[in-house]
Image: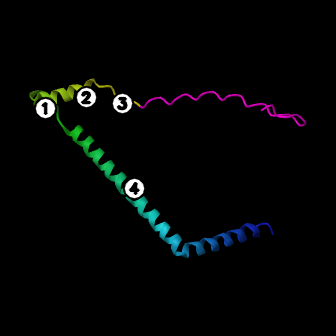
Amino acid sequence: MFPLLPFAAGVLAGAVALRLLKTERTRSGLEKAQDRLRDATVSGLEAIEHASARAREKLASTPEETAERGREAAGSPAAAAQAAGEASAPPARKPAPRRRKPKAPAARSAAPGEENPS
């Protein structure tokens, strides 16, 4: 008898789920969610592609190319100032969260038969 109850509950839940999936409103909601998920996946993959391309470029460059870039940057004062500013600037950090104030003790409620003083 007991193994039949979970089976019957599963059949009933499946029937309800099928009815819900057949409605147009549910189907359109699922399609919208699928589109959003697909867009998020594509954007994430594009970000990974760009990051790996930058890393590949950085790793593939030879020390000579790096020195040439340094000489070019040294030639223009604006580029040199920008490079110096980037090198000496500390990384930005998030501010620490504010501390919570301790809660004030709750006002004493009147006992049964007593009146509240306020």
Residue in the image at 55% along x and 72% along y = 21
Mark 1: few/some/many CA within 10 Å (<14, 14-19, 20+): few
Amino acid type, label 3 = Ala
Query: Residue tagged by mark 4?
Result: 40
**Is label 3 or label 4 in front?**
3
Q: Which residues are magenta?
A: 94-118
Snapshot quadrant of residue 13: bottom right
For mark 2, what is the residue?
86
User: Cα distance, mark 2 to mark 3?
Assistant: 12 Å
In this rendering, the label closer to the viewer, 1 or 3: 3
Instruction: Residue lying at the far left in this picture: please name it.
Output: 75
The secondary structure type at the circle numbered 3 is loop
User: For residue 74, what is the image quadrant?
Assistant: top left
Q: Answer few, some or many: residues within 10 Å of disc 4's Cα (few below 14, many 20 plus, some between 14 and 19).
A: few
Q: Earlier in the sequence, mark 3 or mark 4?
A: 4
| Most frequent secondary structure within the magenta stretch | loop
Q: How many neighbours does mark 2 have within 10 angstroms: few (below 14), some (14-19), or many (20 or more)? A: few
Query: Depth check: 88 or 56 in front?
Result: 88
Q: CA distance from mark 1 to mark 4?
A: 40 Å
What residue is pinned by disc 3?
A: 92
Tell me, yes or no, whether the highlighted magenta stretch contains residue 39.
no
Q: What is the distance, in whole Å, between disc 3 and disc 4 at their CAs?
A: 27 Å
Instruction: Kindly report which numbered mark, 1 or 2, lies closer to the viewer in this rendering.
Output: 2
Quick check: 86 left or right of 14? Answer: left
Q: x and y percent of residue 19 in the render?
A: 60, 75
- Marks 1 and 4: CB-CB under 8 Å? no
